[in-house]
Image (cartoon, rainbow, N blue to C red):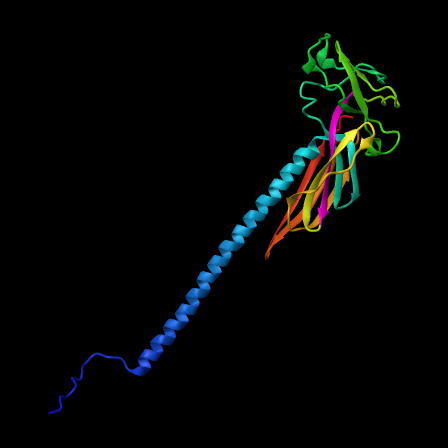
Amino acid sequence: MKKDTPPNSAGFTLTELIIVIVILGILGVMGADFISQAFKGFKDTDNRSEIYEEGKMALVRMELEIHNAIPNAVNLPLTTELQFGMIDEVAMRNIFGTYNENPPTTLLTDLLVLPPTSDPTAFLPVNSIISVYNRNWGDFTSAPIRLYKVDAVALGTMTISSNIPPPRSSPLKRYYAVDRAIRYQLSGNILARAEAPVTTAGVGAYGPDYPLAQNISGLTFAYAPASLTRNGVVTIIFTITRGVESVNFHKEVHIRNVP
């Protein structure tokens, strides 16, 4: 005997199942797109953070070195290249860097070591290279080179090389020890740094380039020379791009104006 199906028995029709599957599919696509956009946002934020840190570290390194450049010893052969002479801070750590003779001839008397002393830490080391009233980059690179070597130290005086033209008279009787020249330049898409030795013969050959930052575009250096009333200023502008993220960097660095 055939049993009748109760009128209220549970179940789904094929049409209802198809509708549910379509709705779930739409929700799945929407959810996947939402999750994808969220992960993309996280990735873009991470890229921007890495770009910022890379650019910030490069700017901090350049700012520290440019700030300690020899006054007026700055050169821009290209807008994408900057060269400058560096103060030897290790040699100058106990030295005030002024003298009594004006203009100096063969003796530089450091005011910090008066009255006379034989303390070796109160003098620049023998063979130190010094700049006295450097006026421009040409004093480092074009004859006559106006860089001088410390030949001897004794009792409050330093004897400097006397076989080259005597130093000019510095308005504030200052001198600086020089230990190297620094070059920043755009090499491909890399902001690169290199060093060169400095002697009484001038600036030597630059060594290998070391990267400070990558994926660089639009690098520009500018230099406003010092005057009697303001410091020299080096302006640095560049952009770092990674994927679709780009960050612009801009910095103005003052160079001491005490020639």
Please state if 213 lies on the left or on the right of 11 as rendered: right
Q: Main secondary structure of the magenta part?
A: strand
Q: Which contiguous range is marked in magenta?
A: 173-187
Give the percent coordinates (x, y) of residue 157.
77, 12
Residue beneath the point at 81% across and 28% down: 134
Please state if 226 lies on the left or on the right of 25 as rendered: right
Q: Quadrant of the image for the C terminus? A: top right
User: In the displayed structure, would residue 7 be above or below residue 255?
Assistant: below
Q: Tally the numbered discs.
A: 0
Based on the displayed image, in which of its 4 quarters is residue 53 positioned?
Answer: top right
In this view of the protein, which residue sits in the foreground, 73 or 180?
180
Residue 247 seen in the figure? yes
Q: Is residue 175 magenta?
A: yes
Q: Quadrant of the image for the N terminus? A: bottom left
Give the percent coordinates (x, y) of residue 107.
82, 15
Based on the displayed image, in which of its 4 quarters is residue 195 positioned?
Answer: top right
Based on the displayed image, in which of its 4 quarters is residue 9 positioned?
Answer: bottom left
Residue beneath the point at 68% across and 45% down: 191
Give the percent coordinates (x, y) of residue 172.
78, 21
Residue beneath the point at 70% across and 34% down: 66
Residue 226 seen in the figure? no
Give the percent coordinates (x, y) of residue 197.
75, 32
Residue beneath the point at 47% across and 58% down: 38
